[in-house]
Amino acid sequence: MEYLGIELKKPKVSFFDFTCCEGCQLQIANKEDTLVDFLSLVEVVNFREISSEKKDHYEIAFIEGAISRQDEIERLEKIRKQAKLVVALGTCACYGGVNSLKKRFSVEDVVNEVYGHNPVETLPVKSVKEVVAVDFEIPGCPISKAEFESIILHLVLGTEFRFKKYPVCVECKQNLNHCLLDEGKICLGPITRAGCNAVCINGKLPCYGCRGPAEENNWPSLKQILTEKGFSPEQIDEKTSFFNSLTEVTKNES
Amino acid sequence: MLYKTISKANFKVFINEVIAGNVTIAPKMTDKDSEGNPVYQFQQVYAFDEIALNYTKTYSSLKNFFLPFKESLSTFQFDKNEWKQKIEYSIHPRVIVGVRACDINGLLKLDNVLMKGKYPSPYYVARRTNTFLIGLDHEPMADCFCQSLNSDEALHGFDLFLTDIGDKYFMQINSSKAFNLFKNVQINDIETEDEEKYIAEKKRIASLFKTRVAITGLSNLMDIEFESDVWKKWGDKCLSCGTCAMVCPTCYCFTVTESIDVSLKFALKEKVLYSCNLVDFAEVAGGHNFRPEPATRLKYRFYHQHRGFVESYDEPKCVGCNRCGIACPAGINPIDVIHDLRMEDVK
């Protein structure tokens, strides 16, 4: 693998899934138009969606999913010891994601509701960084294929990758969308980090903030806007806490 | 300039002919807001009946057809130790129908910067000179303040401009290209009655403006009020989301990004429109940010509109369309901000 005559080193990468839908890994596996080129950039050591091979020698571990069981904690700690870099992949790994909805109930109630008389062991949901040290986080539910590919390219070329610091609104208006706040919906685009190309709003679904807060996030102002539009604190909280990705921004201010 | 009239029936025939032979862009209804009001955008049309000629104003401006939000400046092809650069800025000619005077004036302001300046942009020039513009007069909306900015009348910068005078349009023909298009469609000489109707209609439109913004001396006032609390008041509401600059017909600030294709065989240098309200607009190498506070960034957006641009081009950058005011989720609009600066009662 050469770039401008320079031989590049292929990093050995592994993908591991925890409590999640494995949709982020699927984003990578089904990006068929560039998959061959992408797979020539890295050496895939573990990636059960595309290969049954398993090896223990890898440099970068991509962790998909939240952590919600004791055996997951032990497995994750073992991966941390093996990998040089641990990357949280997707909103579940970065923030707990949809699984965090479980936090609204007691563990007993959750187990009883889902498993009835066949209880399973489960813990309150944690993000990866709440369990082990994380070197890099790639948010998104699911992750953006284009952004992920760009991150890997930067890694292989040894250049710094920069997330967009501005909120989703920029990409939303660049796609000529009409503001969903003006259509009577709670949209969290103004405080959420761009990089998704406003994919939800392009499809008329308001932003739930899966990518976490933008660098500048004026939550007090957005909260006031939503309140003035007649939304109750419960309605607002339901959206902002959906992915547990904006908690750091929305809980600091009450 | 030639003055003619065209019957509305013939105008429809004419536009359908234009559509048949050209990429044609016109206002279309694309959404409805929570109160049921239609939302319009400029989009490609395939028949006259798709065009919302009686539209109010489009949510976004026409800007992106001349300054695309993302535009390839250059592509690179790598081959072993060699690389080739390719620069492409030719475009297919296209027609835009139903453009308001304020939007034509917005393009004239962009022309000053990107076409007539010391360093013209070949990308902009290609798009501008290959676009045939058909303007159309309209009644102002309640929040339009283009009259205050002298942008309610377009004197040039278009190929055709129409004013509705009943069963026909009073038509200003401003290019030989436009004149030649009427070979197959009947147009008529101006009669006294047409002139009278045209003058009456122009007067009627001019009398309908409800919103006025005092512009005289505004650029001096901006200097005097540099430390004003007004900036903090509106800055506290600002979401730093860049919506205002995206929908604005004249905001042209941009960033340049470079990306390498995953095949490692190609690379792209792309221009992406940016906004001075975004958090890292004034961030420089090494990480220092000259404008870390939202209030400062908001202030400088108004400064460029009403002070910086005036120094360079003797006129404000703003055309008074209030698109930013409509689109701003936080309700920040130039009418209230300028009233506040002048210490007038805010409505």
Image: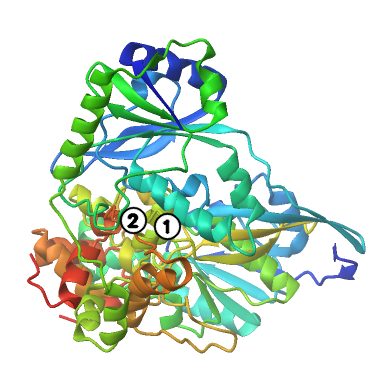
Residue B142, position as x, y percentages in the image: 15, 48
Task: Identify residue type, mark 1.
Answer: Thr
Task: Identify residue type, mark 2.
Answer: Val
Q: Count residues near mark 1 (Cα–Cα under 10 Å), then give few for <14, some for 14-19, many for 20+.
A: many
- Sequence-earlier tag: 2 or 1: 1
> Do callouts 2 and 1 mark residues in contact (Cβ within 8 Å)?
yes
Q: How is the image coloured?
A: rainbow
* SS category of the residue bearing label 1: loop
Q: Which mark is residue B319?
A: 2
Label 1 resides on the chain identified as B
Q: Count residues near mark 2 (Cα–Cα under 10 Å), then give few for <14, some for 14-19, many for 20+.
A: many
What residue is shown with label 1? Answer: B250
Q: Is residue B223 above or below residue B126?
A: below
At x 45% / y 56%, what residue is drawn? B109
Q: Quadrant of the N terminus of chain A?
A: bottom right
Res. B188 visible in picture: yes
Q: CA distance from mark 2 to mark 1?
A: 8 Å
At x 20% / y 57%, what residue is drawn? A113
Q: Is residue A67 above or below residue B252?
A: below
Which one is nearer the viewer's eye here, B154 or A223? B154
Which one is nearer the viewer's eye here, A118 or A163? A163
Query: Are labels 2 and 1 on one chain?
Result: yes
Label 2 resides on the chain identified as B
Which one is nearer the viewer's eye here, A74 or B7? B7
